[in-house]
Image (cartoon, rainbow, N blue to C red):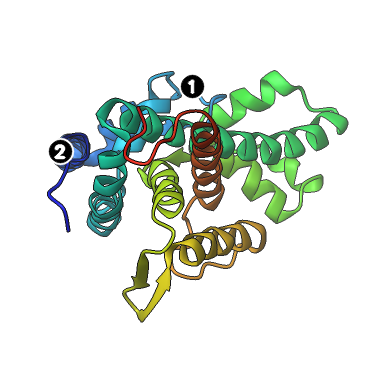
Amino acid sequence: MNKITDTVKHLIIINVIMFIGTLAIGGGTLFYDWFALHFPKNEAFQPWQIITHMFMHGGFMHIFFNMFALWMFGTAVEERFGAKKFLFFYISSGLGAAICMIGYYYFRFVSGMDILNGAGFDQAQTIETLKSGYSVYDTRWNQFLTQEQLQNFVGVFNSTMVGASGAIMGVLVAFGMLYPESKLMLIFLPVPIKAKYFIPGIIALDLISAITGQSFFSPSNTAYVAHIGGALTGFLIMWYWKKTQFNKNRWD
């Protein structure tokens, strides 16, 4: 393994500092309120959260595996891109992940809101009711929304998103396109698989999980749509750069 590159090292340090801050200040609540990505209609949402959420993590194993992946794959990718392009690529993949997740949440939220609007509920008042508490809702909504629809509607409004996974999925895609013949293995499946097969396979499992809700390797609350958004953003940037800027040694 090559020595860790500067940008990867700095990203890991920032993530660790944010994680320590989460543990040390306000029992984690304050950092989540300030820096986790909230649903845009929620009053807790702030524009900077679109960036800061990708430096937040929900637990030790969450940050450990993300930072391990960033070190393992990001170092090789940064060596090919250079520091500036790698940082642009990393942040862009994280933003793509966030945009896809917010879009998915909006779809689920608007679906419930449309039903309630059709039933005669005022949209502004409905949102004010949601703002009044984490799990508070108008019990009359039960007459028009199924239990699943109600959980989606209230849950999305109060959702928070944290983690570097979307950005790292973009980095994985870049690694797979730069080093397609490299062999990778899952910890619990020690069979070497070429990157050009391994990474699309991981993305396919995320897609299946997003559609079915069935988790294969990650916790059930994993933002699979964000993973797909980060991977798609990374692929589109790589596709463009490969057509316009790639040479044998470096992406200049």
For marks 2 and 1 on the same chain, the one whose residue lies earlier in the sequence:
2
Residue 183, by quadrant, is bottom left
Q: Is residue 182 above or below residue 47?
A: below
**Mark 2: few/some/many CA within 10 Å (<14, 14-19, 20+):** some
Between 185 and 139, the residue placed more toward the observer is 185
Residue for point 42% across, 73% down:
193
**Mark 1: few/some/many CA within 10 Å (<14, 14-19, 20+):** few
Residue for point 87% across, 31% down:
118
Using residue 215 as the reference point, say whether residue 85 is left or right of it: left
Between 18 and 187, the residue placed more toward the observer is 187
Mark identifier at residue 207: none
Q: Is residue 36 visible?
A: no
Q: Which residue is mark 1?
A: 43
Residue for point 79% across, 27% down:
121
Quarter of the N terminus within the rendering = bottom left
Residue 120, by quadrant, is top right
Q: Name the amino acid type tagged 2.
A: Ile
Measured as percent of width and height from the top left, residue 62 is found at: 30, 55
Q: Is residue 110 visible?
A: yes
Element type at mark 2: helix
Residue 14, by quadrant, is top left
Measured as percent of width and height from the top left, residue 41 is found at: 57, 24
Q: Which residue is mark 2?
A: 13
Residue for point 56% across, 44% down:
155
Measured as percent of width and height from the top left, residue 49 is found at: 39, 26
Element type at mark 1: loop
Q: Name the amino acid type tagged 1.
A: Glu
Between 64 and 111, the residue placed more toward the observer is 64
Measured as percent of width and height from the top left, residue 63 is found at: 26, 51
Q: Is residue 20 above or below residue 220?
A: above
**Distance Cα–Cα, label 2 vs label 1:** 30 Å
